[in-house]
Amino acid sequence: MTKMPSVCFFFLLLVSAAMAEIKTLTISNDARSMILFEKFGFTHRGHVTISVKKVLVESPSKISIEPSRLGFFLLSEESLLQVLMEMQQDPQFCVLDSHYITHLFNFRDLSPPPLSSFNQSYPVTAPNEYSLFFANCAPGTSVSMDVRTEVFNFDSDNSKDFLSAGLTHLPSLFFVFSFAYLGFLGFWIYILYTNKRSVHRIHFLMGGLLLMKALNLICAAEDKHYVKVTGTPHGWDVLFYIFQFIRVVLLFTVIILIGTGWSFLKPFLQEKEKKVLMIVIPLQVLANVASVVIGETGPFIKDWVTWNQVFLFVDIICCCAIIFPIVWSIRSLRETSKTDGKAARNLAKLTLFRQFYIVVIGYLYFTRIVVFALKTIAAYKYQWVSNAAEEIASLAFYIVMFYMFRPVEKNEYFVLDEEDEEAAELALRDEEFEL
């Protein structure tokens, strides 16, 4: 058989999040030896329903095809390494022969042509996280078929829950954080109203960012709620992606503009700062396209891993790019402090931007590295923990950033204290403010 490299197989399972929803898709002339359809956390009352029709297996060599060599199976996380070892030890090994998988059905069970269909529901009584695969162990063949999958757990009231066991709390989680951001927005509007003389254009952008974040979370909550109870998002996924795009672009723009000191330190952007924005915004458009493809399709499409790599690569570039304006502002303030005679003010600004630099680095590290680690190591029943950690870190970052650059007339960072002027000059001479 055409064997999937073990590394690619492992990477596919690693980057695949636990998915849900009722999926209907078409496979056309696909020669892959294994296709991952779903990854789902089951309780002791789990079910998987598979419906296939219009099945066509083609072979250019016109050789006889054994139908039992093509079929569907479930693979638990605990059995993954054993199956990988079997595949590595024998290049001709067919995964359908493994004792570590849960067989569902093979093409021998299909109805006679021209219908060539099959429809069956299977109970899953052993709680675990399983991956639903299709395997093609007939070398040189390609498969075409229409597939419909329903993966769900039964709740205590016998209602279907289409969210994975570790994600069933996400609707409530997202609703709680959406209310937190709406409250934050109300407080921010109050601060702007009571400090009108200190308000700059950047503060309105920051308010818009809070609004987009709240709307994004509301749509995420509604999306997950409808998926949980019906298996489909009822259009909320479209609104989710729209507000996610606006929110992410606004977040990176606000961080870059704050890093440049736009509106509260200077009324304009330099050419190099404009170039950073012109690089980051189109890249975020590409990243959001990749996010939509990843979220709305799944590992069953041939280029799904590629889209994951594109998203990761673009995200890394953007995270690096937003650091440059902060570094440039720190260097510019260090140079200015040597000539303008305002040591105390410059020391306060340098301290502010150095702290902001550390906060941004910490936020990016936590949401990209730590959250991914939590998703990888957490038991399937606690997958929601990584989402909670990400939202807590994001809320903490927003609070710190908004506090540091709030429109207060007597902001501690911008107060001129003549008594401390001499001490500030000494500090600027002794402290290099290296990053």
Image (cartoon, rainbow, N blue to C red):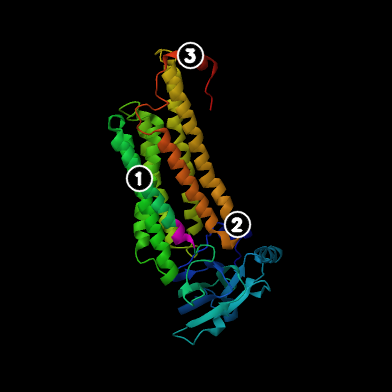
Residues rendered magenta in the picture: 169-173
Disc 2 from disc 3: Cα separation = 50 Å
Q: Nearer the viewer, residue 178 or 275?
A: 178
- On the image, the x and y values in percent for residue 137 come to 60, 72
**Residue of label 3:** 425
Amino acid tagged 2: Ala
Q: Which mark is residue 185?
A: 1
- SS label for mark 1: helix
Does residue 143 appear in the picture of this structure?
no
Amino acid tagged 3: Glu
In the image, is 324 to the left or to the right of 40?
A: left
- In the displayed structure, would residue 193 be above or below residue 65? above
- In the displayed structure, would residue 240 be above or below residue 338? below
Disc 1 from disc 3: Cα separation = 39 Å
- In the displayed structure, would residue 223 be above or below residue 308? below
Disc 2 from disc 1: Cα separation = 33 Å
Q: Quadrant of residue 200?
A: top left
Amino acid tagged 1: Leu
Specify few, some or many for label 3: CA neighbours under 10 Å numbering under 14, 14-19, or 20 or more.
some
Which secondary structure dominates the residues rendered in magenta?
A: helix
**Residue of label 2:** 378
- SS label for mark 3: helix
- On the image, the x and y values in percent for residue 313 come to 49, 46
Q: Quadrant of the N terminus?
A: bottom right
Task: Specify the farthest residue to the right.
Answer: 89
Q: Quadrant of residue 123?
A: bottom right
- On the image, the x and y values in percent for residue 139 come to 59, 71
